Amino acid sequence: MTIFALGINHKTAPVSLREQVAFAPEQILDALRDLTTTTQVSDAVILSTCNRTELYFSGSAEQSKQVIDWLSKFHQLDLAELQHHLYLHQDQQASSHLMRVACGLDSLVLGEPQILGQVKQAYSHSRQAGTINPAFERLFQKTFSVAKQVRTETDIGASAVSVAFAAVSLARQIFGQLGKVKVLLIGAGETIELVAKHLLEQGAEKITVANRSYDKAAALASQFNGEAVSLAQVPQALANADVVISSTASTLPIVGKGMVEQALKKRRHKPMFFVDLAVPRDIEEQVAELEDAYLYTVDDLQSIVLQNLQNRQEAAAEAEQMILQGVTEFSQWLSLHGQLDVVRDYRDKGEAIRDELLAKAGKQIAAGHDPEKVLAELATKLSNRLMHAPTKALRQLLQDEQPQQQSLINTLLDL
């Protein structure tokens, strides 16, 4: 049995192709069953995220070609175009790739934690579809064990490596729990949407979104039960905000020093934390001169991100060693599992011969033949059938006249 990992990701394919190869959650179960029926691979797991679509399966080299063909037909894609962007790993490289993916080492953002949950979901779908056998069960359990070790024993996910996450992490360091902290987000683009997502993950509940287009602000705020205001209402909204994070495409500052001074007076100088993620700036740099206002720019956060990225890269080196150990342990188990299959097959064959001859002997006795002669014939035929193949192999091995083989033969035959 050969283990394969086939797929495309953010490194090998543009988003336009990744979108076409992706599997919707409601497609997974039917796709798994169709894959195993069409190609007759013995195991199958489909992992599909925004940055990758991967198929893990076991079978032959010929079946791996069938899986590629199946993938192109399932999504109605040109086979040659798809093959240009695919990668195919097998055996130890395949199990290593799976473990690296689960640990976040192959992600767009190094060490991101969401991928482990997505791998577990893919495994769960395969169990539900009945497309996982003992070898893959062992592979995925070992993968989850290694990922847990990497998460608990290294700093792979401890540091923020995006400015959006860094901004929220900094707010959490300053305020502790964010559940009671009032947040004002200025803008409604991708960066602010990502900030909002991180805020929710950190427990923030009181979020207001301000944007030039009120409809866009309302659409974003509705995703987390927040409030929406227009840019014209920002001066009033400032007075209620403990944290202000801004990222717009404005060419002029939106929040000025005077506006913040007025807000601080209304707040009786309760401190405010500002993060300006915009270039050009949304918040006047003079705001940092105010005693109760703490302003961080995208440059400030970028230096934090670079340092954190270096920390994650060092942790990734530790993780690679853990993955190597995990791959080695799984390969050893797989090898032993294969050897146990040989032992089982040998015993099954011996028992089948026994049952066959015993059934014939029973019929002879029932027909009135002499039981002693029947038993004697049974013993002779049984010993001859059981010893024929081993004796033939032994003669061939003994022709080599190698001491190591002679010693092994004596041990096997208990001589």
Image (tube, rainbow, N blue to C red):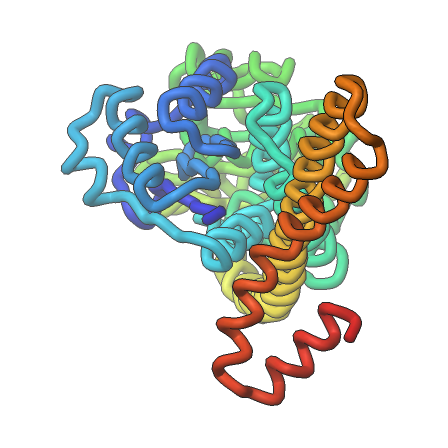
The relative height of residue 159 versus residue 367 in the rendered view (above or below) is below
Viewer-nearest residue: 222 or 63: 63
The quarter of the image holding the C terminus is bottom right
300 w.r.t. 25: above or below: below
Examine the rendering and report whether any part of residue 158 can be seen.
no
The spot of residue 369 in percent (x, y) is 77, 26
Q: Which residue is drawn at 34% across and 35% down?
A: 249
In the image, taking residue 306 as reference, residue 213 lies left or right, namely left
Q: Residue placed farthest to the right in the image?
A: 372
Number of labelled discs?
0
Q: Which residue is depicted at the point 47% across and 41% down?
A: 58
Left or right of 88: which side holds 133? right
Q: Residue at the spot x=31%, y=41% of the render?
A: 62
Q: Which of 29 and 291 is in front in this view?
A: 29
Nearest the camera: 399 or 168? 399
Residue 404 at what x, y percent from top left?
A: 62, 85
Give left or right: position of 84 versus 168: left
The quadrant in which residue 128 appears is: top right
Q: Which quadrant of the structure image shows residue 78?
A: top left
Q: Is residue 275 left or right of residue 175?
A: left
Front-lying residue, 51 or 411: 411
